[in-house]
Amino acid sequence: MSTKNAKTVLPAVAMTAVSMVLTLAVVMMWLGTAVPWPVALVVGLGIDGGWLATLAYERRLAAQGDHSRTVTAVGWCFGAIAAGVLVAHALTAEASAGAWLAVAWLPIAAKALWLVHGMWERTALTPTALDAIRGIQQEARDEAAVARARLRAEATTEATRLTAVTAAGASVARVQAKTAQSLSRAWSTLETARQGEDTGRALTSVTRPVTPGVTPSWELPVWGRSEPVPALGWAPPALTDTELDGLVDEIRHSEIPALSYREMAIRFRAAGHSASEVRLRAAWRRVA
């Protein structure tokens, strides 16, 4: 018997022994006054012997990995009989009835302890299996701790990056505001000079031929949106989907291993081909 089994089997054995002794003693005292003591002894030993026999047979079946409901039911019947004898004696005893009634539950408790011991044996694991389970649990805890640390580190890095980007954006915004303010002051100065009377007379004096009463217009420099640059007179023909797929597949497999989308797009445009980003990505999905 191993040390772990002793944790459940020893209480069950002790409770059974106490219950059998109490049952025999009660039968001897209770029936000894009505029948000869050998008869009372046989009755007490019969109850205890039947209980012990069914218990031994039930333990034998459990050791073989088997179970019999009939044997279990007979064992519980003997336990109930023993408990009934103790309860009946307690109810008819003139002295110490409470004490006898307090120990009347011991046979049922002994059967329950044997039931717990059987469940312990059916669910018991070997030390190797327990070590494997502990190793798996420890590995899971380690992986969870590493994952949490990685997430915290990534969160810290992302927070630092966002702080840096925000600071850079604020600096750019301040520079743009200062530039816009300077351009606004320069524009105001030019507009004031354009609308001034001295400026008109000066322009009139240098205009050839001089036209009396006419001041040549002086347009301010353009600040803001300008006219779009006209498109080239010649534009390369647009590639069809089939031609685009062929070029993407050819560039992608120009090296081993195959190029990534970014590398393929760079070489595609460096070769002078033209296609929108949407069409280029769609062609990449079709061939890749």
Image: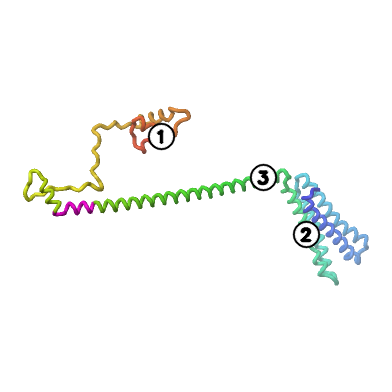
Mark 2 to mark 1 CA distance (whole Å):
76 Å
Query: Does the CB distance between marks 2 and 1 fall below 8 Å?
Result: no
User: Is 199 left, or right, of 43 in this rendering?
Assistant: left
Q: Name the residue under label 1.
A: 284
Mark 3 to mark 1 CA distance (whole Å):
46 Å
Q: Mark 2 points at which residue?
A: 109
- Image quarter of residue 278: top left
Magenta-drawn segment? 187-197
Query: Does the CB distance between marks 3 and 2 fall below 8 Å?
Result: no
Quick one: which residue is furthest to the bottom in this view?
A: 94
Q: Where is residue 222 in the image (x, y as percent from the top left)?
A: 22, 46
Mark closer to the observer (3, 2): 3
Q: Name the residue under label 3.
A: 135
Q: Is the magenta stretch mostly helix, strand or loop?
A: helix
Q: Which amino acid does label 3 sit on?
A: Gly
Please tell me which residue is depicted at 49% across the width and 48% down the height of the picture: 157
Q: Which amino acid does label 2 sit on?
A: Ala
Magenta stretch contains residue 54: no
Please tell me which residue is depicted at 27% across the width and 32% down the height of the picture: 235
